[in-house]
Amino acid sequence: MGRGGHESEASQVRAQVGGDPNAVTQRVLRAFDTPGVMGAAGLVESPKRQEAVSGGVDCARARCVALTFDDGPVESTAKLLDILAERRIRATFFLIGKNAAERPDMVRREYAAGHEIANHSYTHADLGHAPEKMVDAELTGTQEAIRRAIGVAPVLLRPPYGSTGRRLTSKTRRMGLAQVLWTVDPLDWQIRDSRAVERRVMKSVRPGDVVLMHDIHPTTVAAVPRILDRLERDGYVFVTVTELFGGTMTPGKIYAQR
């Protein structure tokens, strides 16, 4: 979801990021009542999810890229999940809390397929400039909506518009949320053209990048198959954000590129 200053955000990201991630323990709030087997961290996981998250990739050697999708889940998310499932590719979904509360079945489908589920605020608020009470409501509301859907709360936050600051960093540190920005932004919210989205991603992407797209736009979803095909031909390996950064991320810290 864009606004006037969105175009300049990606250029600021690299200057905000530095250092290596340190270990952080993912907090499990409760197991969700779904048939399956015991998986990592004691969660009740479906066999499909257990299979999807098994194995590992060394992104220090492989040409890793993390595909991320913002603002869902919405109707077009289902088509995107079909595309990713067909290719056995996992991504990271930064969810709007309101949408997650309205479509918990879609959140469960994302999680069961092995995708990483993350916080993107409850209403797509500008968290870097919002009053403290509003920030609290935006973050905790989304955490709770996702927890109700899948039994665990996220450990990643993408601040809408990339808007962050000292106060939000302090808040996310206390809440156990690492901040995730991006290095590739095709501006798909602005240019609703599938071929243009594809061209912009392929022109900019490099190993270790975090690619920002929006599953709320059917034109973006339509661009994904060709993006995946071309990236695979170029030797890229698709990983979640946490995998890209070595499996552990520090609460409060800003991440954008490995």
Image (cartoon, rainbow, N blue to C red):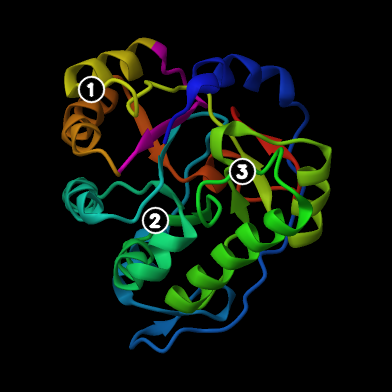
The residue positioned 75% from the left and 41% from the top of the image is: 253
Task: Please identify the quarter of the rendering in which residue 152 is found.
Answer: bottom right
Mark 1: secondary structure: helix
Q: Quadrant of the C terminus?
A: top right
Task: Please identify the quarter of the rendering in which residue 181 is found.
Answer: top right
Q: State the image coordinates of residue 228 (x, y, percent, origin top left).
A: 24, 31
In three-dimensional space, the C-alpha distance between marks 2 and 1, rounded to whole angstroms, equals 21 Å
In three-dimensional space, the C-alpha distance between marks 2 and 3, rounded to whole angstroms, equals 16 Å
Amino acid type of the residue tagged 1 in the rendering: Arg
Mark 3 vs mark 1: which is more N-terminal? 1
Mark 3: secondary structure: loop
Amino acid type of the residue tagged 3 in the rendering: Gly
What's drawn in magenta, residue-wise? Answer: 204-215
Q: Is residue 139 above or below residue 244?
A: below
The residue positioned 52% from the left and 54% from the top of the image is: 118
Circle 1 residue: 230
Q: Is residue 248 above or below residue 188?
A: below
Circle 2 residue: 115
Nearer the observer, disc 3 or disc 1?
Answer: 1
Mark 2 vs mark 3: which is more N-terminal? 2
Q: Which mark is residue 71?
A: none
Report the number of discs. 3
Which one is nearer the viewer's eye here, 226 or 16? 16
Assess disc 3: are there few (<14), some (14-19) or many (≥20) residues with their C-alpha within 10 Å of its C-alpha.
Answer: some
Circle 3 residue: 246
Q: Is residue 93 above or below residue 19?
A: below
Q: State the image coordinates of residue 38 (x, y, percent, origin top left).
A: 46, 83
The residue positioned 60% from the left and 52% from the top of the image is: 156
